[in-house]
Amino acid sequence: MATNPFLLAVSTMIVLVAGSSQSLARLQPGKGELVEGTTQPVARFYAPYWQPSDAVASFALKKPLNKSTELPSDYPIKPMFEKVDGKHRVRIEVAPGTSLYGTGEVSGPLLRNGRTTTLWNTDAYGYDPTNASLYQSHPWIFGVRPDGTAFGILADTTWRTVIDLNGAITITAEGNAFPLYIVDRATPQEVCTALMELTGPMPLPPRWAIGYHQCRYSYYPEARVREIANEFRTRRIPCDVIWFDIDYMDGYRVFTFDKNSFPDVPKLNADLGKMGFSNIWMIDPGVKYEKGYFVSDQMVEKGYDVKNAKGETFVGAVWPGNCIFPDYTSEKVRGWWAGLYKDFMATGIDGVWNDMNEPAVFAVASKTMPEDNQHRGGTYSSGPGIQPQIVTPGPHARFHNVYGMLMAQGTYEGIMTTNPTKRPFVLTRAGYLGSHRYAATWTGDNSASWFDLETSIPMAINLGLSGQPFAGPDIGGFNGNGPGNFESRGKHFARWMGVGALLPFSRGHTGKGNIDKEPWAFGPEVEKACRLALERRYRLLPYFYTLFREASVKGLPVVRPVFFADPKDMALRSEDDCFLIGSDVLVVPQLMPDGTRTPVLPRGVWRKVEIVNENNHPDLPELRIREGAIVPLGPIVQYHDEKPLDPLTLLVSLDTRGQATGTLYEDAGDGFEYQKGQYLLTTWQAKQEGDKVTVSISKAEGQMARPSRKVVVQVLRDDGKIAEASGEAGQPIVVQVR
């Protein structure tokens, strides 16, 4: 572990505010130990008053960390604990110049210094920066010191928690006393990997899921769905997925279909598949409370519903009217829920969208179920082969923040059981630290405003820094039509598509009653911008897929803050209007209507490039390639597997030594044969000698045969031009650059 002078210091006193009076309370050092289970040991601290009765199942950790050793007496990080008014508080001082990030799904700037976040999953329709809580809870702080070294702090509690980053780091939580995990590493990237080692890897998604998705509330009836699909293909606008919101259901009853609007779901899904579209259908947790409805009847008969404080069935209003709610804290309930997907998925459904799972409840001030509702508990395991933990019964206040994650787990396992040869895809609105093990996410019901366009970038980045690499916003904004008149709305939409097409989860979506927001809805010029934006994404799919694989094995985010390029550069610490895709592609968008702000860019050579045509569209972001990088590109396709990756283009940006490297990960795009070695991970190197650049394979891994295809090498020159040559796969290719 690093032990530099910027390590967190010890705090001895804190001013507490209780009502209108102030009092001084003494903080006490925690009981510390080192625990194993990651590449380097992790420090774990307990409050001095912690008792074995405080121990509960961890939903954040992939598995319990029980093997421990004594914490060195000179360990420099000593969190201070106290208990005030029944709440547990820990405070850690940070050195001046320390930058703080993470805290999960938060609106506003990337840099979280001076911000307070409440971890309480909330149905936050049309949220803005004043929302202290949103749809997800990640009790995780990511810190970077002035010298570029980094640390992470995980508060392992599911109760309502407040993270205050005004000056020091202060974490206050209800419920039982909780353990605190601290990772201390040499680089921010190593902290990301340590978090993955603690909370588990993200499963590698099916390749179709990293294409573009089209959604609205709602596409119905069937004829409208077919119209949308035909427009994409006729207009030659790339798209992989069509989504179905709640109006496909019979009276909003989950696991049913409205036979009038969707008379033959298997045929519809099959026809979409023939056009190259996958499909995703929504399932909510609120089950219509109705005798004769099979889901409701099974829940009541088995006693699988959440109970109120009196032990009676809790009933709350959601879209179908009066609803009951599955108690996902029980493995029996999650198993039953998983079984419901057998017939549902048999209609040809490819993926599932879990919404409203905070859980959202209508017509109550809290927007959710009472905190004194009761959950039965049972056992919990993060996945196959992981020893189950005992989940003791408890109030909803304890399980509220993990309700959505446990629902997503049941959904993931149901899809996996039904289609064991395919990789599941689940999208969840509500989540907790560890939800990435089961589902991707989006940033909820944002608004069609310039601010929400701008904040969508730091939201995706902070989610990535908080262990959720697969995230993105509703492109174009869910709430509202957009700013100004038709023309200004079109510009806003084009700008958002330019950004959203380059974020990990890329989906256009808008609410009921809003204007149409398909890529062609704002006229020919906006349609052209959207087509170019999505063609960029599809050219970059080989690179994106390689990054998703890296996220699944190393925990590195797909999109990253620009300070990852140089963690010691303090000027980059608050920059969140531009971002990195992986380590090699820099995205520089214009996020204001007048395009006035100039972002701070990393030092070094970042060569401008346009990967679709020679002239960049004025509403699309500028793309730059890092010196020393080789970025793999594919041809423009209308969906991910329209044709093979042929030709493969290697975009080369040489460093000052005339060298560059890059990798490409390939597998079948679905299924699990890659886990048995059926993949190909290729590393290329480029080296300049005189006026020639030779690109050759320096390393190859995996048992998959190298495809026979054309390989095009494009070397970016300092004058902005491209030198090009082509050859066969596996053979060195020489490019004349002068």
Image (spheres, rainbow, N blue to C red):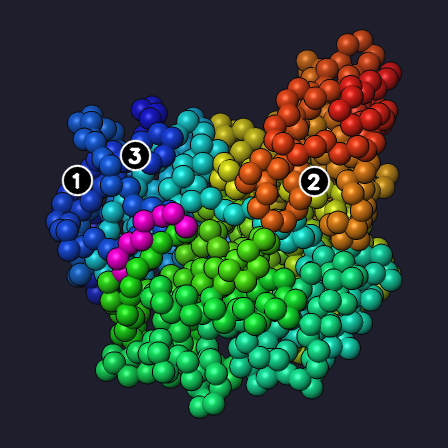
Name the residue that disc number 2 marks.
542
Question: Separation of disc 3 and disc 2 at Cα?
Answer: 36 Å
Sequence-wise, the earlier of marks 3 and 2 is 3
- 22 vs 238, left or right, is left
CB under 8 Å between callouts 2 and 1?
Answer: no
Q: Residue at x 64, y 54 (%)?
A: 209
Span colored in magenta:
384-391
Label 2 or label 1, whichever lies nearer to me, is 2
Sequence-wise, the earlier of marks 2 and 1 is 1
Tell me the amino acid under the disc marked 3. Glu
Tell me the amino acid under the disc marked 1. Lys
Q: Residue at x 36, y 48 (%)?
A: 386
Q: Residues within 10 Å of mark 3 (few under 14, many from 20)?
A: some
Q: Residues within 10 Å of mark 1 (few under 14, many from 20)?
A: some
Name the residue that disc number 3 marks.
36
Give x and y (percent) for residue 585: 66, 36
- 7 vs 519, left or right, is left
Q: Main secondary structure of the magenta part?
A: loop
Most distant residue in the top direction? 690
